[in-house]
Image (tube, rainbow, N blue to C red):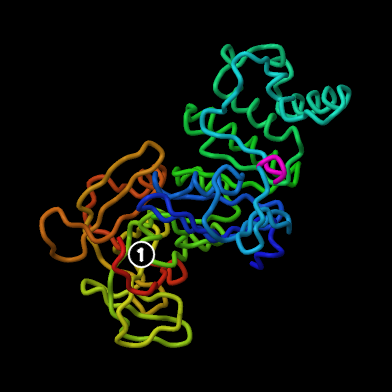
Amino acid sequence: MDGESASLSVDIRKRLGSFLLRPCFSVDQGELIVLFGHSGSGKSLTLRAIAGLLRPDSGRIRIDGRLVFDTARRIDLPPQQRGVGMVVQNYALFPHMSVAENIAFGLHGDSSAARRARLAELAAFLGITELLQRRPGVISGGQAQRVALARALAPRPGLLLLDEPFSALDSAIRVGLRRELARLKRDLALTVVFVTHDLREAYNLADRMAVLDGGEVLQSGTLEEVFNRPSSARVAHLTEVRNIWRGLVVATDATTTTVDTGRFQLRSAGGAWSVGETVDVCIRPERVLLMRPERAPSGAGTDSIISVDLIDEVAHGAASTLYFRVGEAATGAHDVEVDISSHVYEVMGVRGQRRWALAFPHQALHVMPASNAS
């Protein structure tokens, strides 16, 4: 993606004690990009730099084709000139003001009639008209989130920044607000930067995803690219791939690459690998296929099929994680994790059955450069 043509492009550096923030990513108009990573990875600091609340030491930030920060050109626009709306974790609503006054706070330059019209428009759009005369202290967390969104949207920003906005809310409320945010983005054609450490939230919301670790964007791309084709073992670990093996390339052609992990061999879709090269190979646990041994194909094929023993399982309500061992191993060790729905678990009669076969679709397997990261 061309940074100069993107709706938002960020390439900055900021030293904070021993921590070096150095994010680099871009996102197109109307897309929602999730900044994902563990606590302390630099997600919120990046958001503050975009908003103009944290001054980088070097680099540039471009919003809608306009430079808002560039050390080389000595450009550093203040927050109110960047065309950005922002919602923080605690919503930061003014407790002494009514909901209406909170929403209208950013409309100082508008006429009274324009302020009333915009207030009514946003209240209807977000379903909070009946709350306008109340104070923040007497409304629910979900309602406060809608008020904070309305206040951020009031000046018609081109870019909306959301810093873990749903983290303090109950699960049911979060689900509803995620749908609300998706509708808001679609109907208003907004570009959104959404910070979270919740992988499910990232999966449900993102058009694009940037994985941060130690202040750096390790990978940025579409949701499908990041989840299914991680750039490194570290990205795979952070996005909960869970099945990652170090191996040696033993065969390769135009369509497949065969990797020997030392305990079994896997055939992945082809890539630019050489025989004898050390690599990492991975697959998400929900993409491994569980089969009864008697139904597993015995002939040659592109997909890898291995015989395994089920050694443990953990139920998660609507799904279960199954742990399998290939051949003999140390007590308690497992080689493969598989996630299946509770319905599949019951239909296949998993309980009490030890011997199984696993199929690894070659398009779902992904080979990466060998890495020391974990």
Relative to 294, residue 184 above or below: above
Relative to 107, residue 187 above or below: below
Left or right side of 243 for 205: right
Provide the residue designation for mark 1: 233
Left or right side of 84 for 167: left
Relative to 366, residue 243 above or below: above
Quadrant in the rendering for residue 346: top left
Q: Check residue 58 for magenta coloring.
A: no
Viewer-proximal residue among 6 and 201 = 6
Type of amino acid under label 1: Ala
Quadrant assignment for the N terminus: bottom right
Viewer-proximal residue among 298 and 308 = 308
Give the residue drawn at x 84%, y 29%. Answer: 110
The residue carrying pointer 1 sits among few (fewer than 14), some (14 to 19) or many (20 or more) residues within 10 Å by Cα, namely many
Residue 235: percent from left, percent from top? 40, 60
Residue 73: percent from left, percent from top? 66, 62
Quadrant assignment for the C terminus: bottom left
Quadrant in the rendering for residue 231: bottom left
Relative to 266, residue 3 above or below: above
Viewer-proximal residue among 344 and 240 = 240
Left or right side of 311 for 278: right
Q: Which residues are magenta?
A: 79-84
Give the residue drawn at x 37%, y 74%. Answer: 369
Residue 210: percent from left, percent from top? 51, 56
Residue 153: percent from left, percent from top? 71, 35
Viewer-proximal residue among 75 and 93 = 75
The residue sitting at the front extreme is 74
Q: How many marks?
A: 1
The residue sitting at the left extreme is 331
